[in-house]
Image (tube, rainbow, N blue to C red):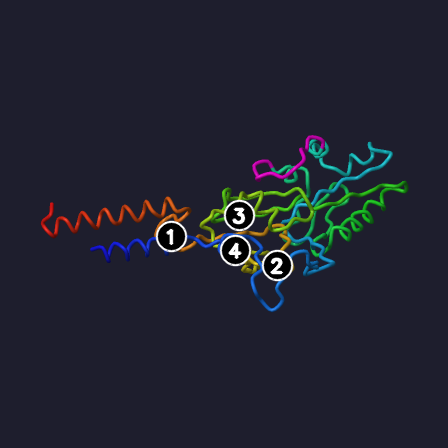
C-alpha cells in the first residue's frame, strides 16, 4: 500500500507541475543562431508596410481653407463621430471607425460621396492616400490635403486568453505582444509554444504556428499582427489530470486520490 501511495504521489507531482520553460516568454531556446541579451535583432521585413485588403476599414478625411466645400465629400455625421473619438484601444464593443470610416468591399473598392468608387485594395496606406488625393484634385484648384489611415487593427482572440473575442488596437502597427496584452495575459495552462495565427491573404487564409517561448519570435515575419488576424491559444493536456497551477492544487489532488484509495483498501481488507 505504501509503495502504491508513493507511486501515486510521484505521478500526481510529475503530471501536475508545469516547468517554467513552458511558461516564460522569449527564452533563448537553443537553435542554429541563438539570440543573446542586448543583441540587435532586425525585423524579418525591414520595409514592412501593410497592404490594404477587402473588408478592411480605412479612415479618410480632408483639410482645406474652404471647409464648406469639403462637406460635400463626406457622409453626414462622419465628422461628428470623428470629433467624439476617444484615444486608446478598445475591446470591440464600440468600434468608432466602423461608423466614421470607409469599408473596402469584396472587390477592393470604397464608395465615397461625389468621388464615387475608388479601388484601394492592394495598395499601401501612402499609395491609397495618393490615389484619393488624385481623385479629389479634379474638383479643386486650391490645396486640399488628404489624410488616410487604417482604421485601427482588428483581430480576434480565442482559447486560453483572459478575454476572448474581437479586439481593436488604434495604431497602424502593433506587435503580437500588444495583442496579447490587450486580450489579457494568457492562462498559465496555455500552450505558449503552439499559438496558432490565422491570417488573411489574397483569396484565402493560412494558419501559422508561433512559439511565444522562443526569442527568435522577435525576428519572425509574424511578430507584427495584421488586420483580421485570429490568435488561437491551445490549452495544455495537463488540464486532463488537474489544474497544476501551483503546488497546493497539486497536493490537494494527490491527497484526494490517496484518501479514496485508502478508503477502498480499508473496505476490501475488512478494516472498516
Name the residue that disc number 2 marks. 201
The answer for how far apart the CA atoms under marks 3 and 2 are is: 18 Å
Image point (28%, 46%), residue name: 255
Name the residue that disc number 4 marks. 195
Mark 1 in CB contact with mark 4 (< 8 angstroms): no
Region rendered in magenta: 83-94
> Counting residues from the N terminus, which is met first, the one under dot 3 or under dot 1?
1
Image point (17%, 50%), residue name: 264
> Counting residues from the N terminus, which is met first, the one under dot 1 or under dot 4?
1
Q: Nearer the viewer, mark 4 or mark 2?
A: 4
Residue 227 lies in the magenta-colored region = no
Which residue is at the far right? 141
Q: Nearer the viewer, mark 3 or mark 4?
A: 4
Name the residue that disc number 3 marks. 157
Which residue occupies the foreground of this view, 172 or 189? Answer: 189
**Vertical comparison of 34 with 24: above or below:** below
The answer, for residue 207, to whether it is visible in the render is no
Q: Secondary structure at mark 4?
A: strand
> Is 63 on the left or on the right of 121, as rendered?
right
Graded by Cα atoms within 10 Å as few (under 14), some (14 to 19) or many (20 or more), the crowding at tag 4 reads some
The answer, for residue 10, to whether it is visible in the render is yes
Amino acid at each position: 500500500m505504501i509503495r502504491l501511495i508513493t507511486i501515486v504521489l510521484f505521478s500526481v507531482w510529475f503530471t501536475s507541475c508545469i516547468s517554467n520553460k513552458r511558461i516564460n516568454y522569449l527564452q533563448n531556446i537553443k537553435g542554429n543562431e541563438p539570440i543573446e541579451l542586448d543583441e540587435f535583432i532586425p525585423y524579418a521585413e525591414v520595409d514592412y508596410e501593410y497592404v490594404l485588403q477587402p473588408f478592411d476599414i480605412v479612415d479618410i478625411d480632408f483639410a482645406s481653407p474652404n471647409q464648406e466645400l469639403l462637406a460635400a465629400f463626406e457622409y453626414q455625421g462622419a465628422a461628428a463621430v470623428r470629433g467624439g473619438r476617444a484615444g486608446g484601444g478598445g475591446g470591440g464593443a464600440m468600434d468608432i471607425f466602423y461608423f466614421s470610416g470607409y469599408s473596402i468591399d469584396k472587390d477592393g473598392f470604397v464608395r465615397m460621396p461625389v468621388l464615387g468608387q475608388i479601388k484601394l485594395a492592394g495598395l499601401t496606406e501612402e499609395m491609397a492616400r495618393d490615389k484619393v488625393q488624385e481623385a479629389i484634385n479634379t474638383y479643386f484648384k486650391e490645396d486640399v490635403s488628404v489624410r488616410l489611415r487604417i482604421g485601427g487593427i482588428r483581430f480576434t482572440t480565442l482559447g486560453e486568453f483572459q478575454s476572448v473575442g474581437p479586439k481593436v488596437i488604434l495604431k497602424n502597427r502593433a506587435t503580437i505582444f500588444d495583442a496579447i496584452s490587450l486580450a489579457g495575459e494568457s492562462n498559465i495552462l496555455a500552450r505558449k509554444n503552439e499559438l496558432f495565427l490565422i491570417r488573411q491573404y489574397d483569396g484565402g487564409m493560412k494558419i501559422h504556428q508561433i512559439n511565444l517561448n522562443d526569442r527568435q519570435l522577435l525576428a519572425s515575419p509574424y511578430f507584427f499582427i495584421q488586420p483580421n488576424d485570429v490568435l488561437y491559444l491551445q490549452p495544455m493536456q495537463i488540464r486532463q489530470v488537474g489544474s497544476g497551477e501551483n503546488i497546493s492544487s497539486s497536493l490537494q489532488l494527490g491527497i484526494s486520490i490517496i484518501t479514496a484509495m485508502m478508503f477502498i483498501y480499508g473496505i476490501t481488507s475488512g478494516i472498516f
